[in-house]
């Protein structure tokens, strides 16, 4: 099916949809009820929010880390992008239950770095170069082992130099070392798998964009969702939330001990996908976006596809609420995990709705 009349290339500017937690998710009610379960159980206390709406020290720490890596000298165009991200607010909004400034600093630095990294990778046209840089990125994150391959490393170095990614590699190397030192091993293994999926999806994105250009249509909705569910990185974000709040599940088996744990995590990942793409409609003109895929699949205009996507978002959010509360009620020892992870995605909803990154 060809693109409908209002193609993504001519998407008019429109304000970001209102995705605030109270209106679409009843997040406050869920957080309150799971906290009550924790109090009733008596074995754990509800985690405390201690960072407020903005933390100036955090903002300075992140800006300093990026500056010391040489990023702004190598890529000065990213300095104003960082100001839009406003890491001093992003960190407390996404991770309100971080147990310490050190952990909040690390997870915020990771998120901000990969926001910027993703923007740079999006402008690259060669799938092979994206894969080469991705390989070095995963090595730096300790997500894969380095290969003693002279020719491969020569090609990687050439791609990194060509695209001015040296400072990114220095920054990511530091982030990877800090995670390896501080993350429980079973969490780091899952975190590494999530990073492998996310980094791999960046090359897949270029392939899909090339297909879109040559075929003059978006990928099918099923193909789009298959790619985007990995690319959006919600599984990694959930791990960051439990890590920085010090509520990690005890071992790898614990994550699969109850299907609802996986169901809640997958549901939150889908919510993140919908939040991001709804809030990015104007910004994503000419790119891949769930709403544009819905337009093509349904054969409708942008406004109708947007409304359908918002309705699906609401349906998904309600089911996540049901599953999360059920899990916390039946297994009170998991209620703290539910509170922390849910609060992070509630923060994501707020971020996508109100922060300037998603406003032109």
Image (spheres, rainbow, N blue to C red):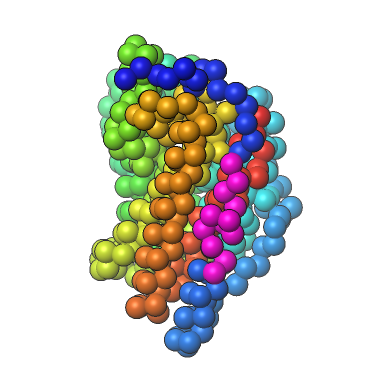
Residue 226's place in the image compared with 208, above or below, is below
| Horizontal and vertical percent position of residue 59 | 69, 48
Residue 125's place in the image compared with 356, above or below, is above
Asked which quadrant contains residue 84, the reply is top right
In the picture as drawn, the residue positioned furthest to the right comes out as 56
Residue 243's place in the image compared with 133, above or below, is below
On the rendered image, what quadrant is the C terminus found in? top right
Q: Classify residue 191 as left or right of residue 8.
A: left
| Horizontal and vertical percent position of residue 327 | 36, 71
Closest to the observer, 307 or 13? 307
Number of numbered discs? 0
| Horizontal and vertical percent position of residue 316 | 41, 53
Asked which quadrant contains residue 201, the reply is top left
Report the residue at 32% width, 59% height from top. Answer: 263
- Does residue 321 appear anywhere in the picture? yes
Report the residue at 32% width, 13% height from top. Answer: 215
Residue 26 colored in magenta in the image: yes
Residue 321 colored in magenta in the image: no
Residue 19's place in the image compared with 52, above or below, is above
Report the residue at 50% width, 65% height from top. Answer: 340
| Horizontal and vertical percent position of residue 266 | 35, 53
Residues in magenta?
A: 17-29
Q: Classify residue 273 as left or right of residue 167.
A: left
Closest to the observer, 213 or 161? 213
């Amino acid at each position: 099916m060809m693109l409908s009349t209002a193609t993504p290339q001519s998407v008019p500017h429109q304000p970001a949809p209102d995705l605030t937690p109270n209106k679409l998710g009843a997040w406050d009610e869920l957080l309150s009820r799971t906290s009550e379960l924790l109090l009733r159980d008596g074995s754990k206390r509800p985690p405390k929010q201690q960072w407020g709406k903005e933390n100036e020290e955090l903002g300075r720490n992140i800006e300093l880390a990026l500056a010391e890596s040489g990023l702004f000298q190598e890529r000065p165009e990213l300095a104003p992008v960082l100001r839009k991200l406003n890491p001093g607010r992003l960190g407390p909004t996404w991770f309100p239950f971080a147990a310490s400034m050190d952990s909040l600093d690390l997870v915020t630095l990771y998120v901000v770095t990969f926001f910027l990294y993703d923007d740079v990778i999006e402008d690259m046209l060669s799938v092979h170069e994206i894969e080469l840089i991705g390989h070095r990125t995963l090595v730096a994150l300790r997500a894969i082992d380095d290969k003693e391959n002279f020719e491969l490393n020569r090609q990687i170095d050439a791609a990194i130099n060509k695209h001015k990614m040296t400072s990114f590699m220095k920054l990511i190397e530091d982030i990877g070392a800090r995670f390896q030192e501080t993350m429980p091993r079973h969490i780091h293994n899952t975190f590494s798998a999530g990073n492998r999926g996310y980094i791999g999806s960046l090359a897949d994105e270029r392939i899909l964009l090339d297909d879109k250009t040559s075929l003059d249509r978006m990928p099918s909705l099923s193909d789009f969702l298959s790619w985007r569910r990995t690319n959006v990185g919600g599984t990694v974000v959930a791990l960051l939330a439990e890590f920085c709040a010090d509520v990690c599940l005890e071992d790898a088996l614990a994550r699969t001990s109850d299907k609802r744990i996986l169901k809640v995590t997958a549901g939150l990942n889908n919510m993140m996908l919908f939040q991001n793409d709804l809030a990015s409609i104007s910004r994503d003109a000419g790119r891949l976006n769930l709403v544009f895929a819905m337009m093509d699949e349904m054969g409708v205009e942008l406004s109708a596809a947007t409304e359908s996507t918002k309705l699906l978002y609401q349906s998904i959010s309600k089911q996540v609420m049901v599953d999360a509360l059920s899990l916390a009620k039946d297994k009170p020892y998991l209620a703290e995990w539910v509170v922390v992870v849910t609060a992070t995605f509630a923060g994501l909803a707020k971020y996508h709705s109100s922060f300037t990154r998603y406003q032109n």
